[in-house]
């Protein structure tokens, strides 16, 4: 059995930063995550994608942010159970027992659910033979952009992910075609304008009112069939087809833990981001409250207040005084 002060479910940026804030209060943490490495979506989906709203970093790659967080929490020696899913929670006195699908049992008086969007699956377009080309030219997420260098790429989608990767890959791939089923986009206007400008300059091809309805190839993907409104359909030769329609979030086992759920998110109070079960907190994208913003920096704030409450649950008689790191420094565990 693994015993600690806070069990953190989710090894994304918010879960990792929780270790740091808890460590400042001399609280130990153990993190559980279904993915085989820390980082959550940032390492699993877009490690090479730049992030622009982290304070102090005008621009930082998602993967680099995770590396920095891992360095930041290293002095506090967190434990990790990776590649396993937390499937059940039981109460034992003042503690909780969290069991994974691998049979590991974790014990702590506090649980911080920092599972991001929960268990996520890519939204797939309704193409009959789509699954035949998965890992053979069809990718639902981009982990390493270099994979597409000097290749022909067709991207489908109208949101920020499709727009951002179209802009990014136009300077790497041999050719990039963005296909969207309507004439309006859900992404940022600035990104839409960049795509349109690049299309006018011939740096990429933008096809609106278009859907990919069929794939073709022998050993791997060779071409996609584009159905175009009011025009003749055409086959587009390509090495890769990237349907970037976002993720379908699911809470998974968390939905059965007796927590108050609202539209696939866990309801919390903004005083300390506690749930309806004392000792269980929810921070980051997985929680919901009035005025909620799904931003990493907001998750950092939530984690900071949450560990203060967790400390008081363990040491109700201790007077907790805020001490600045500029004064005390960062003293890790031996």
Image (cartoon, helix red, strand yellow):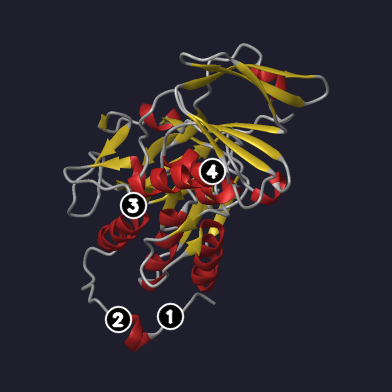
Q: Position of residue 6 (x, y in %)?
A: 41, 55
Q: Which residue is mark 3?
A: 295
Which residue is found at the position 51% from the left and 42% from the top? Answer: 199
Q: Earlier in the sequence, mark 1 or mark 4?
A: 4
Q: Is residue 303 above or below residue 68?
A: above
The label on residue 330 is: 1
Q: Earlier in the sequence, mark 3 or mark 1?
A: 3
Q: Could you tell me if the residues under marks 3 and 4 are in contact, i.e. CB atoms within 8 Å?
A: no
Helix, strand or loop at label 1? It is loop
Measured Cα–Cα span from mark 2 to mark 4? 43 Å
Say which of 65 and 256 sits in front.
65
Say which of 211 and 294 sits in front.
211
Q: Earlier in the sequence, mark 3 or mark 2?
A: 3
Q: Could you tell me if the residues under marks 1 and 4 are in contact, i.e. CB atoms within 8 Å?
A: no
Q: Earlier in the sequence, mark 3 or mark 4?
A: 4
Q: Is residue 88 left or right of residue 145?
A: left
Measured Cα–Cα span from mark 3 to mark 1? 26 Å
Q: Is residue 171 above or below residue 181?
A: below
Q: Which residue is mark 4?
A: 166
Helix, strand or loop at label 4? It is helix
Q: Is residue 178 left or right of residue 252?
A: right
């Amino acid at each position: 059995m693994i015993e600690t002060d806070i069990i953190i479910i989710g090894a994304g940026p918010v879960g990792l930063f929780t270790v740091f804030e808890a460590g400042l209060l001399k609280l130990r943490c153990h993190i559980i995550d279904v993915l085989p490495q820390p980082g959550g979506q940032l390492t699993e989906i877009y490690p090479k994608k730049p992030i622009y709203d982290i304070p102090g970093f005008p621009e930082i790659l998602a993967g680099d942010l995770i590396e920095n967080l891992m360095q930041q929490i290293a002095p506090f020696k967190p434990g990790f159970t990776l590649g396993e899913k937390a499937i059940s929670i039981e109460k034992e006195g003042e503690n909780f027992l969290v069991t994974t699908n691998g049979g590991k049992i974790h014990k702590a008086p506090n649980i911080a659910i920092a599972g991001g969007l929960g268990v996520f699956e890519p939204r797939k377009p309704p193409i009959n033979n789509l699954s035949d080309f998965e890992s053979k030219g069809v990718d639902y997420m981009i982990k390493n952009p270099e994979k597409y260098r000097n290749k022909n790429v067709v991207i489908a989608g109208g949101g920020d992910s499709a727009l951002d990767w179209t802009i990014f890959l136009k300077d790497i791939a041999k050719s990039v075609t963005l296909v969207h089923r309507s004439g309006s986009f859900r992404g940022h206007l600035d990104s839409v304008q960049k795509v349109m400008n690049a299309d006018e300059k011939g740096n990429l091809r933008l096809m609106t009112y278009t859907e990919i309805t069929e794939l073709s190839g022998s050993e791997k993907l060779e071409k996609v069939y584009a159905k175009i409104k009011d025009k003749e359909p055409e086959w587009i030769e390509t090495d890769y087809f990237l349907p970037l329609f976002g993720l379908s979030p699911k809470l998974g086992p968390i939905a059965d833990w007796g927590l108050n759920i609202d539209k696939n998110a866990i309801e919390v109070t903004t005083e300390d981001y506690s749930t309806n079960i004392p000792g269980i907190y929810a921070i980051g994208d997985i929680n919901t409250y009035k005025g909620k913003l799904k931003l990493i920096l907001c998750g950092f704030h939530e984690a900071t207040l949450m560990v203060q409450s967790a400390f008081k649950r363990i040491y109700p008689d201790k007077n907790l005084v805020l001490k600045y790191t500029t004064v005390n420094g960062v003293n890790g565990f031996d």
